[in-house]
Image (spheres, rainbow, N blue to C red):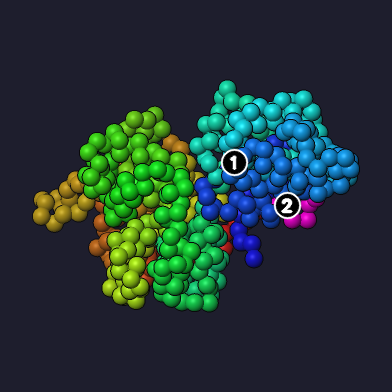
Amino acid sequence: MFIGREAELQFLENRYHAKGGQLVVLYGRRRVGKTETLKQFCHGKPHVFFSCQECTDRRQLHNFSEKMLKEDLPAKQYIDQYADWEKAFRAILDLPYGDHRKLLVIDEFPYMCRDNAAIPSILQNLWDEVLKDSHVMIILCGSAMSFIEKDLLAEKNPLYGRATGIYKMTEMGFYDAASFFPEYSNLDKVLAYSILGGIPHYLRQFDPELSLSENVKQNILTKGCALYSEVDFLLRQELRETLLYNSLIEAIALGNTKLNDISQKSLVDDTSKTSVYLKNLIELGIVRREFSVDMKMKERAGNSRGIYRLTDNFFRFWYAFAFTNYSDLEIGDVEGVYQYEVEPLLHEYASFTFEDICIQYMQELQKANRLPFRYSRIGRWFGKTTVRDASQKNGFRTAETEIDIMAVSRQMQEIFIGECKFKGRPFRYSEYLDTLAKLAPEKEKADFYYGLFSESGFDEKVTAAAREDDKIRLYTLDEVVGYEKKTG
């Protein structure tokens, strides 16, 4: 069963029904579900779907010719292979699809260009000459994101300015990912997402009829299963110095988020080298650089205050639990690793993911126009702010801290502060007071709203305070996880 990807499918449908020739580039990291999404889009439409292989240019042309000539083309009566790529691409005009658009999908297009760098130029010339004014749709798909962005679409490259649509696919959000486990409890849906993230290939490895713990043991920690070797396989395909990257990713997974801390923990002497390696991981969609939500774009350029996070939840889980216990897993001690290493820490590990889910919930509320104001930016905030301290005369002091969720209006006249508690106890009144104390000096300049998100509800004093103040909103786990997002 195909799940999610409504936005991607709608984008492709819009291009399919638009006027004129359509040249669409769809790209994204491996395993994100590009091929399955394209197959779903093509379902019910006459089309040619060609998957490139890592092979010589001659073999690639032979394979492409064979695929095209399976259609009822005039040329199949007298040739079994096109003489060159110009003739092969031009053949799309002869596809016998009647009033339907002539649809060609080239999956893993970078493989096609690897042994023949002239292919983008050939396609560009043909597009400018005839295809752009024809009833055709060509979709170029690829996982090599650096190639797509720097070698295919960048200025001065052949296809620059020709694409009628460019879509970068990212992993699924929580609400689509949770659909893979319809019978799981809301708590287990959060835990599953914190383990697998939104990569469809990873989500499909879990059996929704098995418990979460059995799925982790059987489909991640057991040697020989698909996910056991996934991280190593992906890194070796994309990178050369895998031992070094292992150290960097492990450092981030274990909570080191600042450049200097990552460099020290991974034993890389030079932070400038660490920056280069981290940039490569960012390009692969494994790591992201995160800035405080109130920092403007100009301030971010060259700023060293950004922190690094793993964007891929599965990578984070693997390095937090499996990578550090790899020797035990290799000898088959799956039960021991799960019982003593994973199970005691899994709930705490998922608390950071719960913050991400709450941000996604806020995004859905904005789309449904259910927030007190329309924010222009949302994310985490980190810096110095007011915290409660009974030892001080005024009961407060300034300290480095983070705010789980901060949303601000365009002119920063309205500010939303969100605090997320993923704990087996209710949100306490003292924690509520701590939340209200943050950014206290700014309250003279803007209207403040507060959202308290809790896995286990709220104590009576917090509930009473929220009843008396319409600027304080309480969100339970069932509300957040059970939200029916708007589609279409």
Question: Is residue 388 in view from this perspective?
Answer: yes
Q: On the image, numbered disc 2 is attached to which residue?
A: 42
Residue 215, located in which quarter of the rendered image? bottom left
Does dot 2 land on a helix, a strand or a loop?
A: helix
Q: Residue furthest top?
A: 156
Residue 220's spot in the image, x, y percent? 43, 67
Please tell me in which quadrant of the rendered image residue 108 appears: top right
Q: Main secondary structure of the magenta part?
A: loop
Q: Secondary structure at mark 1?
A: helix
Residue 296 picture location, percent across and down = 39, 34
Q: Quadrant of the N terminus?
A: bottom right
For label 1, the residue is: 111
Q: Is residue 475 above or below residue 278?
A: below
In the picture provided, is 58 more to the left or to the right than 388?
A: right
Q: Residues within 10 Å of mark 1 (few under 14, many from 20)?
A: many
Q: Tell me the residue at 54%/59% (across/down).
A: 200
Image coords of residue 197 (percent x, y)? 46, 58
Left or right position of 443 against 24: left
For the magenta stretch, what is the residue range? 41-46
Position above or below: 427 against 302: below
Instruction: Name the spot of residue 245 as percent of width and height, x first.
Output: 34, 46
Q: Which class describes the residues within 10 Å of circle 2: few (<14), some (14-19), or many (20+)? A: some
